[in-house]
Amino acid sequence: MREPALIRMLPDGRRLHLHDGPIDLIIEASGAPQAISAAYEAAARRFVSILDELCSELPLLRSRAGKHAKRPRGAVAQRMFTAVEPYSEDCFITPMAAVAGSVAEAILESMTVAATLERAYVNNGGDIALHLTNSQCYKIGMVERPDCPSLFGSLEITAKDPVRGIATSGWRGRSFSLGIADAVTVLADCASAADAAATVIANAVNLSDHPGITRVPARDISPDSDLGDLLVTRNVELLSKLEIDAALENGLRMAVSLRERGLIHSAAIRLQKCVCVLPPSAATAAFFCRDGFLKPSAPQIHAQLDLAGRTSPHA
Amino acid sequence: MPDVFPPDTVRCDACPVLCYIKRGHAGACDRYANVEGQLVRVDPHILLDRAKSQGTPLVPFLEREGDWDGKIMKGQETFVTAIGAGTTYPDYKPAPFIVSSEVEGVDMVTVVTEGIFSYCGVKLKIDTDRHLGPERNLVRAQGEPVGHVTTAEYGSQMLSLGGVHHLTGGSKSEGRVTCETLLDLCNGKEVELTIDEGASVRVAAGKPPVVNGQREERMRVGCGSATIGMFAKQWLGKVDDVVVVDDHITGVLSEHQAGKLLGVRETGIAIHGRRSTPGRYFQVAEPGTGWGGTNISDPLTILKPFKAKFAWPHLRLLMVSTTGEQFAYYELDDALRPVEKELPETLKESVGRIRENCEPALTTVLFMGGAGGSLRAGVTENPVKLTDSVKRKLTRVTCGGAPAYIWPGGGITFMVDVTRMPENAFGYVPTPALVAPIEFTLKKDDYAVLGGHVDYVRPLGDVLKEKERQRQIVSHAQNPWPLKPRIESSES
């Protein structure tokens, strides 16, 4: 039977938890107490219908996006479509690639429309929409694997930065990936754009015909997957340093091209304990280099940082 | 949309995504899965929320629409249960979760683990007067022996199921069926049991038992003798003699102490069976599923002819069972033979009162298990110290947040009422053995003293952060809050 959407405060009394089917949001707003209440209420009201709206167009959202594809009608669905459209010429992508970021963005928008907030975030399973004003900032920690949540880096985003969306994709995550990255974290103008870009970059972090990589048709695992018979990554054995560098480089090329097209600001790619960072271009902001973004082994990393920002912490 | 599915694909209807889920996989939410062709909620790690009243923390939005101020449920407290925590068995490693929290100024540590119990079973209390089967006879499920009939208690029959001999000592299928039976009973499901040379019963925790297809409604008000004592006054003057038919102790008003005190005249009644004390008879018939747990359907069969010296024509006799469910009214004819007549209005009330004084008949399921070697080692480096600490009541033991009764003596052998635990708290491993949650809560200082894995203690807030695998539920209204620093004797 259909479970009702859940809405509640987390035990800390500050954060709002919204849950419905596969959507799970953690929300926090800062500002005047009445503003927070109004924002949370608006978020909850917007939230209760969002899953049904999306599901009413699910077959369309699971189909390949493209110039000639039918555009969805729903507001969230249109965000999804718009986010994946830039990639639809070059690769197979469906609006579902941006679903998490788009939902986060839509909820955040309902909050900022309803109340004047100093800052707020809507975190949809790691895909985060941000709202920042004045001198506000958020400190974001990055996790490489959801099953062992230790931070591999942290970064600070201020109101002056253009970044309002963060997304992470990888084969260990909840959605399927065609690539082998443990995690690709992307900073972009908005969460839906970050979500789509993270998917595309994570797919690009790859090695062809490698016997240590287990791939299965998506449909074999999940019969109604939007990826159909495409091969998705199920396991990656330990790779050599050369192989890791090659895979990272494939991902990095993709990230660079997306940055050149103005689709993302920066990206961090993690594969088997190696991190590769594409900083934002000088024109944007310098936050990537600030305050120990690559905390775990910063000295080594900086020593090996080449122009593209690629690094490998193998000693 | 996909067109061809393997035959055991299920479609989940928990949300409008309506995922098709293949056997062994989970849906898009990771919360529902296809387990052997069945849609199952894969319970994430369960956290208990301490709420002021039941049902508040998870608020379906639409029910509150209009008046929700975005502030409900602030400041609730959370207790991490062991359900879904996993186990490190058989390794001597620290338990999967060792959580610290501050409660009323005292640092508390809760060690959370799921125990694998090969030494475990359930004690069933079945509220019935009906004879379920001879003591010591085998209790079977699906034809396999899974336990035995043990003592009869006040208004109920006890069965002992499981235990290491049925789980691991018999045939493979005996072990499997025993494990399945225990698991179902502990998770509140109905189980059908048959007793050798006895009845067939359908039982589920907290539900009325069904004996030979007949649902038990009420527990008896007392034994036959006690019933006489309780109602003697109400019968005075309305009837000359009363027999309360009971397989254990049948009571006779005119002979009973209660009747004597009220000056009830001797009636010359004579009863089959063994007289214990005046007005109290054992073994008036064979045990069965008839009147008052005997095998009789005609109560006159327990009467011998009335003694002519005392009896008189038109003598009024009421016969009734211990639950008031069966009754009959007789008057003696000129030959002093009882002739059944309609129950007079004046007696209907007393029969009704017997019935209404009988409490609802239920089946109670207590899980009993022993926390053995490796489980204790997961809590402390020196396992015997944990036993000692539990015995000294410095450490509180709970199962899914429900209070556990700890047996005195060696080891940590405990019993818990499964209806006070969260739903589907139990699992199994094919060993076969049951997997049950168990939490040990004690002061942080005490934990260090008993050689606890203090290096592995994590603040509650950290554990809560891993929201992906967690589910918060409301604490059972009758359970004391497990973290309350008052360490007292575990209650039943």
Image (cartoon, coloured by chain):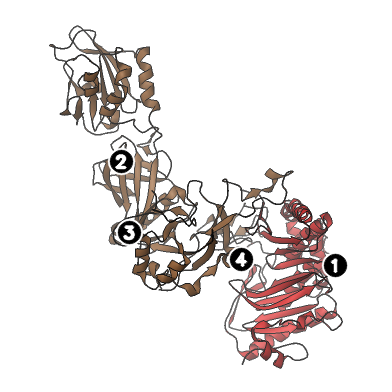
Which mark is in front, 3 or 1? 3
Q: Which residue is mark 1?
A: A67
Q: What hue represents chain B?
A: brown
Q: Which residue is mark 3?
A: B167
Q: Is residue B335 above or below residue B289?
A: above
Taking depth in this image into account, of B201 and B407 the one nearest to the observer is B407
Q: Residue at x 36, y 33 (%)?
A: B219
Q: Amino acid at mark 4?
A: Lys
Which mark is in front, 2 or 1? 2
Q: Amino acid at mark 3?
A: Leu
Instruction: Say if mark 2 contacts mark 1, CB within 8 Å.
Output: no
Q: Where is residue A197 shown, x and y percent of the image?
A: 76, 73
Query: Residue B465's mark?
Result: 4
Q: Where is residue B446 shown, x and y percent of the image?
A: 43, 67
Instruction: Say if mark 3 contacts mark 1, CB within 8 Å.
Output: no
Chain of the residue displaying label 3: B
Q: Which residue is mark 2?
A: B157
* Image side of residue A70 versus residue A149, left or right: right
Q: Residues within 10 Å of mark 3 (few under 14, many from 20)?
A: many
Q: Residues within 10 Å of mark 1 (few under 14, many from 20)?
A: few
Of the two numbered discs 2 and 4 on the same chain, state the one appearing first in sequence.
Answer: 2
Circle 4 sits in a helix, a strand or a loop, which is it? helix
Instruction: Say if mark 3 contacts mark 4, CB within 8 Å.
Output: no
Give residue B179's quadrant in the image: bottom left
Circle 3 sits in a helix, a strand or a loop, which is it? helix
Q: Which chain is red?
A: A
